[in-house]
Amino acid sequence: MRKKIVVGNWKMNKTVAEAGELAAAVLEKLDDGIVTCEVGIAPPFPALTEVGKVVEWSDIRLVAQNCHFEDDGAYTGEVSVHMLASLGCGYVIVGHSERRQYFGETNQTVNLRLKKALDEGMQVIMCVGETLEERENGVTEKVVTEQVRQGLKDISDLGGVVLAYEPVWAIGTGRTATPEQAEEVHASIRRTISEMYGELAAGHLRIQYGGSVKPSNAAELFAKPNIDGGLIGGASLKAEDFVAIVKAAS
Ligand code: PGA
């Protein structure tokens, strides 16, 4: 049985003080229910320390939204894996579609970041997903398979890896993939992983869904056999909505 994992990706939202308050609200609301899934919060970099303090004694994982593939050096604006680790981050997201779309991330740079993070003992959530145009052209499976294969290039052990399928057309648009559409792609990703790493590894790998997950659609999505939780953007900015989604995965 794969343990579901729900992570709130706060993107570029919340000041340090606001982030601390939101994390505290999430923690408080989680405390009055049974949570059986893994839960993480990915605040923006400046708020990692503050959120880390709030969740320190809880089971909530501190997650970073990105990392660089070098240890240090002249890379203005970037943050290295060991810097994140020093703040208590145990997870990092790589290859989010907004990074691919606006900041020139490619399957190759995603692969470099992923390798670096795994080398440093950090767990990684690698995002994949097709654009609307790609879906309409019928190349969803081809694009996602390529992202998975290239992103995981030269990775021999999937132990520290979680994948997130996030159709770009569903992110922040209010337009969710239907549970059937999502399940179809999740199943195809698991087939690809099985071809690459064997059936056992494929059976253990967790694949989150992301893209307009809300309290009203979470349970239906998480009920699908190949959907192992969610990467939650907009709805994670409201403690009650995020906690409702966590409970739907529990
Ligand atoms: P959304 O974002 O839930 O706001 O659609 C999901 C994500 O980008 O991780």
Image: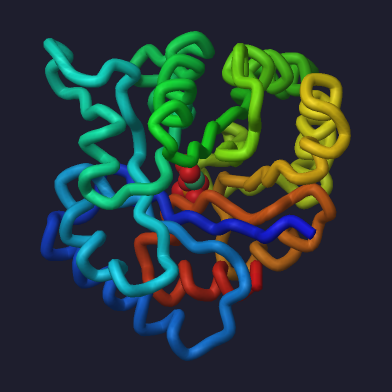
227 shown above or below 133: below
Task: Provide residue 123's location: percent of width, then percent of height.
Answer: 48, 41
* Whole-percent x, y for residue 247 in the image: 59, 75
The quadrant in which residue 70 appears is top left
Q: Is residue 136 visible?
A: no
- Front residue (pair 93, 248): 93
Residue 3 falls left or right of residue 110: right
Q: Residue furthest bottom?
A: 32
Q: Is residue 190 above or below residue 173?
A: above
Residue 244, by quadrant, is: bottom right
Residue 1 in the image: x percent, y percent? 79, 59
Q: How many marks?
A: 0
Query: If the image is split into quadrants, where does the C terminus sit?
Result: bottom right
212 with respect to 57 (left or right): right
Could you say which quadrant of the image residue 113 lies in? top left
Q: Residue at x 47, y 67 (%)?
A: 242
Q: Residue at horizontal 64%, vertical 46%?
A: 209
Vertical arrangement, residue 66 with respect to residue 131, above or below: below
Q: Is residue 119 above or below residue 18?
A: above
Residue 165 picture location, percent across and down? 64, 37
Residue at image point 41% right, 65% down: 60
The answer to whether one can see residue 103 in this image is yes
Task: Give left or right: position of 193 versus 34.
Answer: right
Residue visible at 12% across and 64% down in the picture: 17
Question: What colour scheme governs how the chains and residues are painted in the rendered image of this protein?
Answer: rainbow
Residue in front for this viewpoint, 106 or 40: 40
The foreground one among 244 and 156 is: 156
